[in-house]
Image (cartoon, coloured by chain):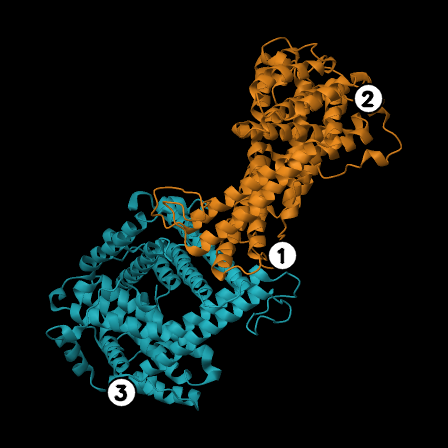
Chain colours: A cyan, B orange
């Protein structure tokens, strides 16, 4: 399972270049002017020296050029009217406006992260900032991609599918080096858990050739750690180079331009004009929910909920895949469902919530908005939309989502251990340690399935026959 | 954890040879006459040809010579009076009589198993019979040893401790070859679960060089299986030779003689004369229960009951023992508690139950006896004894006991895999497969701890503050 499919949906995107024409994209780009592209390009350029100063100047300028209301919202200025698409998201708003407002928020967040990343990527001191920026960028990219997938009938489909493919490519390319680093951390931590004799004063990373003070590893585990470090560091370095190369490519600038268009005005399909959000959005969100439920129904949940079922490790000496794919698929569908719900929450948001909406719509923030509405009285949409939204269910789905993230991470770490064990000419003790490590991560996989099963059953149990 | 400590109690036995004297044993042996020893010797001698015929003649003769009531009970003849010690086990019986009756039953079962084993050990066709006989022999040995441990103040302690040591030696020696065979089976089954690609029509043992039809293993798993088979088969063969040698030793004949004495008349300490069972036995059983509860309290049960706590695998690359010892200790104490309860049930048994008592006192049988008594009205001992007996708790403890057996088996299998991986000059793929196998068995260990924790907590939860 690569990082490619990570922006939120099964790959259905087609390259728009093969399609007859793309008038909405062209039209939108013309409307927003060429300056958006210029600003994005400026933001993406690394600024090794004076990063902070550049952030204050170039960043704000770039934001203003593409009418990004982010900084204004952050300083408490009224957000209404800051961008055309944030207007009219109250009750009875047009479907296109609600979706546009959501896409606008995420596009703005994406461009802001891109700017921060560009400022910090070159300087070693700002590595943490760059990491956070990539996280935020991927978060926004997933949401844009997810919303474009679920509410595809509302937008120009060719344009949307192309953008989703490109978002997936960009965020995957930027994320890969971090994924390798995280995988190495996970495997070395597991090795220490497996191999330390408990005599040391605390955890010491095996990074220094496996002979770190306080946790000297047995020779097999130390060598396994060193081997994994060599292999994953090499992969990480390559991924880093690829990311730098991507940031200088014309393909990257095209994505940044397209997202800038989205921040300015989403290319809503003409035939949704006049139809209200309450009429159009809930059925599409419901379809996303149904796809998720159908996929979960196909999982061996009954078995997964039985602790120590030994399922995830079975056949792991024979092949790499032990039914992981269907779980990874559910992970993506669960995300799509959550982002579809976030759009519905936006439909629910009245004018007073517009400022909140500028924040990245975390599940908690969404829940708070809903709670406030509930206290203010029922002046929201009809019962149909209410049933479709259910932010509490979403809050409960966040841990389920995290369990599936853990499932994916552990599965990939197990694969990395197995793959390292196939290195020619390693010592038997090294291979043995990698075998134990592989099994350990496969049991993490099983534990994650167990956790997901429990969460899912508890949720559907509470909701009764809603499914 | 070897098989040595397997007859039911932490080793407290001292070799009686080092003690000043052993008059009760000598006296008892004189009282029973030399014929018991002769009969046991005859029974233990392998009869390669005409095993069935020899069973009918030699077996019955041997049984009669040492006044074993087993066959008589089996044919429905009244058991009362068949041996002096089975008399007077009803309400208000003397403590020594109750304990003596229990020891008599188990000693009889032991000698019967020894006879069957001697008849079947030499012939390949009767391998299943020999296996069953060893199981039953060990079962009886554990119970004798356990009762002698818990109710030690009632017997001549030097004699009892010596007999316990010798029973442990004998049943350990006879059992070892079966333990190796079971360990190999467990490991090969696990390898197939781990390595088969699921394409085969069913389970096929890896025994034939790992290339059995229907489940061709990948090369690493196949080699690991072959290596384990070589090592454990060699160990098994050696254990078999050692068992045969033991059966011809004077040490063996001394044990058989001592058990024959027990079947005839247990050497009860003189100072218990006249004290009733209800007065003496429950406090001793309660002490056994307390030792068990204290040991369980020391276990990390809260952690064990949290599924996928990854405890059992931690540090498994560093050392062999991951806190297994305390669990093994609880396993032995749980057994002692169960056998102590069985003696109390015997105290509870009236004359009508004497025939039942000739059967090996399985937990189910004990429960049935108790139920029948409950239906017949309260004509049993006082409330104190009733609280101490609690056969229902014992029924619930049997699965807990099995969970700890599984814990021990998996821990030893994991050790065997780790030890095989230390074989010089094995291929990395073999070592890798053994690492996965080791981790798999350590997770079985964790699963067994989880199961025990659940069972124990459910039991103490129901019983409330009884502890």
Name the image quarter holding the N terminus of chain A: bottom left
Which residue is pictured at 55% across the width and 68% down the height?
A: A223
Frontmost of labels 1 and 3 is: 1
Neighbourhood count class around disc 3 (C-alpha, 10 Å): few under 14, some 14–19, many 20 upward: some
| Residue topped by disc 2 | B272
Q: As drawn, which residue projects farthest toward the bottom? A: A49
Left or right placement of residue A364 versus residue B257 in this view: left
**Mark 1 vs mark 3, CA separation in Å:** 61 Å
In this orientation, which residue lies closer to the viewer: B323 or B1?
A: B1
Dots 2 and 1 on the same chain: yes
Q: Position of residue A140 (x, y in %)?
A: 33, 71
Q: Examine the image and state in which quarter residue B68 appears.
A: top right
**Mark 2 vs mark 3, CA separation in Å:** 102 Å
**Mark 2 vs mark 1, CA separation in Å:** 48 Å
Q: Examine the image and state in which quarter residue B465 appears.
A: top right
Give the label on residue B319, or none: 1
Q: What element carries label 1?
A: loop
Marks 1/3 in contact by CB < 8 Å: the verdict is no
Image vertical order of residue A461 relative to residue B422, above or below = above
Q: Is residue B387 something that shows in the picture? A: no
Q: Mark 3 lies on which chain?
A: A
In this orientation, which residue lies closer to the viewer: B232 or A233?
A: B232
Q: Where is residue A144 in the image (x, y as percent from the top left)?
A: 28, 69
Q: Where is residue B15 in the image (x, y as percent from the top left)?
A: 80, 36
Q: What element carries label 3?
A: helix
Chain-order first, disc 2 or disc 1: 2
Which residue is pictured at 89% across the width and 33% down the height?
A: B20
Q: Position of residue B205 (x, y in %)?
A: 44, 43
Q: What element carries label 2?
A: helix
Q: How many marks?
A: 3
């Amino acid at each position: 399972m690569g990082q490619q499919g990570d922006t939120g949906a099964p790959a259905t995107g087609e390259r728009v270049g093969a399609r007859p024409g793309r008038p909405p994209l062209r039209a939108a780009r013309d409307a927003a002017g060429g300056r958006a592209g210029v600003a994005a390009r400026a933001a993406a350029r690394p600024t090794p020296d004076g990063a902070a100063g550049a952030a204050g100047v170039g960043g704000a300028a770039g934001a203003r050029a593409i009418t990004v209301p982010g900084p204004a919202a952050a300083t408490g200025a009224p957000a209404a009217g800051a961008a055309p698409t944030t207007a009219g998201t109250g009750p009875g708003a047009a479907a296109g406006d609600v979706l546009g407002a959501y896409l606008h928020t995420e596009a703005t967040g994406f461009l802001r992260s891109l700017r921060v990343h560009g400022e910090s990527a070159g300087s070693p001191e700002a590595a943490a900032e760059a990491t956070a920026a990539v996280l935020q960028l991927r978060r926004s990219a997933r949401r844009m991609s997810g919303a474009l997938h679920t509410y595809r009938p509302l937008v120009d489909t060719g344009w949307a599918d192309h953008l989703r493919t490109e978002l997936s490519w960009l965020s995957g390319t930027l994320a890969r080096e971090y994924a390798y680093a995280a995988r190495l951390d996970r495997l070395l931590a597991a090795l220490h858990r497996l191999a330390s004799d408990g005599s040391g004063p605390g955890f010491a990373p095996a990074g220094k050739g496996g002979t770190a003070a306080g946790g000297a590893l047995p020779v097999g585990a130390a060598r396994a750690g060193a081997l994994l470090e060599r292999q994953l560091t090499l992969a990480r370095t390559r991924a880093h180079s690829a990311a730098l190369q991507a940031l200088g490519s014309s393909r990257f600038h095209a994505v940044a331009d397209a997202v800038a268009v989205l921040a300015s005005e989403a290319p809503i399909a003409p035939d949704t004009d006049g139809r209200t959000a309450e009429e159009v959005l809930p059925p599409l969100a419901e379809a996303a929910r149904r796809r998720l439920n159908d996929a979960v129904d196909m999982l061996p949940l009954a078995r997964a909920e039985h602790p120590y079922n030994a399922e995830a490790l079975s056949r792991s000496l024979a092949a790499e895949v032990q039914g992981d794919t269907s779980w990874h698929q559910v992970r993506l569908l669960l995300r799509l469902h959550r982002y579809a719900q976030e759009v519905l929450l936006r439909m629910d948001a009245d004018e007073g919530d517009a400022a909140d909406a500028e924040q990245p719509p975390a599940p908690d923030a969404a829940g708070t908005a809903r709670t406030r509405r509930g206290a203010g009285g029922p002046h929201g949409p009809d019962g149909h939309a209410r049933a479709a939204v259910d932010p509490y269910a979403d809050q409960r789905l966040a841990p389920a989502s995290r369990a599936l993230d853990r499932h994916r991470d552990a599965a990939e770490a197990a694969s990395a251990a197995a793959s390292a064990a196939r290195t020619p000419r390693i010592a038997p003790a090294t291979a043995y340690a990698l075998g134990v490590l592989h099994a350990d991560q496969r049991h993490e996989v099983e534990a994650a399935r167990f956790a997901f099963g429990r969460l899912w059953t508890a949720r559907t149990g509470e909701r009764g026959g809603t499914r």
